[in-house]
Image: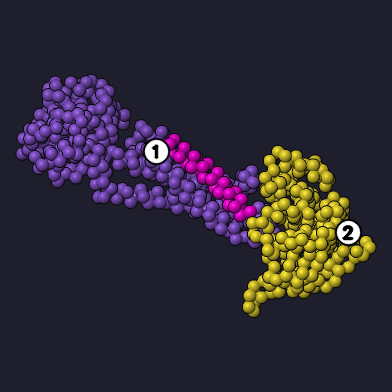
Chain colours: A purple, B yellow
Amino acid sequence: MNFVAIKMLIGDRAKYLGIIFGLTFASLLITQQMSIFVGLMTRTYSAVTDLGQPDIWVMDEKVQFIDDLKPLQSTELYRVRGVEGVQWAMPLYKGLLKARLSNGNFQTCNVFGLDDATLMGGPPEMIEGTLDDLRRSESVIVDINGAYGKLAKPSAIPGGKPEPLKVGDTLELNDHRAVVVGLCKVGRTFQSQPVVYTTFSRATTYAPRERKLLTFVLVRAKAGQDLNELCDRIQASTGLLAIPADEFKWNTVKYFMKYTGIPINFGMAVLLGFLVGIAIAGQTFYNFTIENLKQFGALKAMGTGNFTLLRMILLQALLVGTIGYGLGVGAASLFGLISRNSELAFRMPWQILAITAAAVTFICMVSALISIRKVIKLEPAIVFKS
Amino acid sequence: MTNTATKLAVSCRGVTKTYGTGTSAVQALRGVDLDVNAGELLMLVGPSGCGKTTLISVIAGILDQDEGDVHVFGHDMKHMGQRARTAYRGKSIGFVFQAYNLLPALTAAENVAVPLFILGVPRREAIERARAVLTSVGIGERAKSLPAQLSGGQQQRVAIARALIHEPKLIVCDEPTSALDQDTGHKIMEILRDVALAQDRALVIVTHDSRTFEFADRIARMNDGLIARVDASPGRPTS
């Protein structure tokens, strides 16, 4: 009877395509909006991801997320280095500084100051130049998106395309001359500001005068050291907040989730996709069953049991669900692929696919169950009513 | 299950059926007694609303009577469980509906094969058997046509083939000729008489069409929920 169920479904071409369209649209919207949400949330902690070497981040105990800058006294670095279980501890300056462009405009940049001696915490991938070039005087490394985007120089020809910032070009960072010695690739930041790397000591000269200029202390634990235990020890001996890098990422995401309307906005879009799926696919599937009620009645009269009819309807739901899910997720993937080099945040981990599958399954099951109820309660005697 | 007389295909005793309750209750059957013999074509006739369709629904096991007993080839339909009755219908009863009730997405052969699909016969074998039955009712060449591509008479032939394919013991037909012109209706009745009827099989046909009475062995006339009388066919001797 599976064959009959599939032919009944496909035979009503308009409704079949309507159900597929509804499910495709629902899974596309759910997958795409969730992927953009996850992409945006990933950008909030891109700095933690890019600085891959440290196991633990040490900061002021009131810091809530990566951009919450509450500088420490420079002596805190040495106190952290003195804690048992710490393999190394390096200073990190992180601040938002204004860069003056050649056309006189200002652009806020995310400036990272790395340990002068080791340059620990540098960018994950160099496009041009090397990290060691930061040892040259006035040197900075700029991220490629910033160089081609917000830091690009205006065209010499009026109305022409801006020229990207190149190695050898200069910038003014807080009225200090900075020479570009390299271009790097980093994760896009939440606010899409250009990222600039320099040494810690040079960063502190760029930064406005403040009593404290050490933003974070980056810590690598000794091999075999339990990170949570080490965090507890650092906190106990310095009074600072020490958390593993993964937890810091999650704290940052939680902050954005709690204090911005982003989850609500995306949640609404996902909910909308879900409701549209139920409305279009569910309603069409239900109508399909209602219009075929007499056919189901005939099958019932001819000896088809309720269990077989249930199996037939579930098979129909499974078929349209699988096709709709495949098309929707495929379209979302294509969208992600096309927009991968754009400003759009898009990240589609397997969990999103699983959530979409669960949502589509739910829509199909609800639609099928409503229809099944009607068929199960159907009196086969209706077939004798013309 | 109770064994009754072996020659009896259908035995109804004191069958009642009421639709609705209270003041809106309608008594469709008021104690019907009726016997149908194996190898017999019995027509149920009567005015609209007299209970003909209710009676064949009860006989075919798709509607529960309120009181009375119905035996079909010795099987007590009243005391048969729902699942057993569904299985019995699938195996032993064939249906021909007034509106044909063919599945529009299935070809003629696939429609005919549906009772075999229900019984779990493999698809290829079922379709081959369906083609053979379609040939026996005279439309073998339309096996691959969809119902929408067939005339009313051809669709009814497909429905008859569907009712025959699993070799049921009882075939119930509801107004099989009412939607057809006289010639086509005549041909359909000829098929039912010549192909469907067999020594070990009975046909119960509900009809208004007096032009088809000649094909019956007996005619049971119903009125107001009761069998008023049973006559021999105008064209056949009294049984």
Host chain of mark 2: B
Q: Position of residue A161 (x, y in %)?
A: 31, 29
Relative to the observer, which residue lies in front, A362 or A120? A362
SS at mark 2?
A: helix
Q: Quadrant of the N terminus of chain B?
A: bottom right
Tell me if I can see residue A235 in this picture: yes
Q: Which residues are magenta?
A: A305-334
Where's residue A259, x and y in %? Answer: 25, 50
Looking at this view, is A346 or A51 the one in front? A51
Give the amino acid at mark 2.
Phe
Point out which mark residue A350 bears.
1
Instruction: Between residue A260 and residue B187, name the one nearer to us.
Output: B187
Whether A319 is among the magenta residues is: yes
Q: Is residue B41 left or right of residue A56?
A: right
What's the distance in space between the residues labelled 2 and 1, CA to CA? 69 Å
Tell me the residue that label 2 is attached to: B215
> Are circles 2 and 1 on residues that touch, CB within 8 Å?
no
Q: Residue at x 21, y 43 (%)?
A: A65
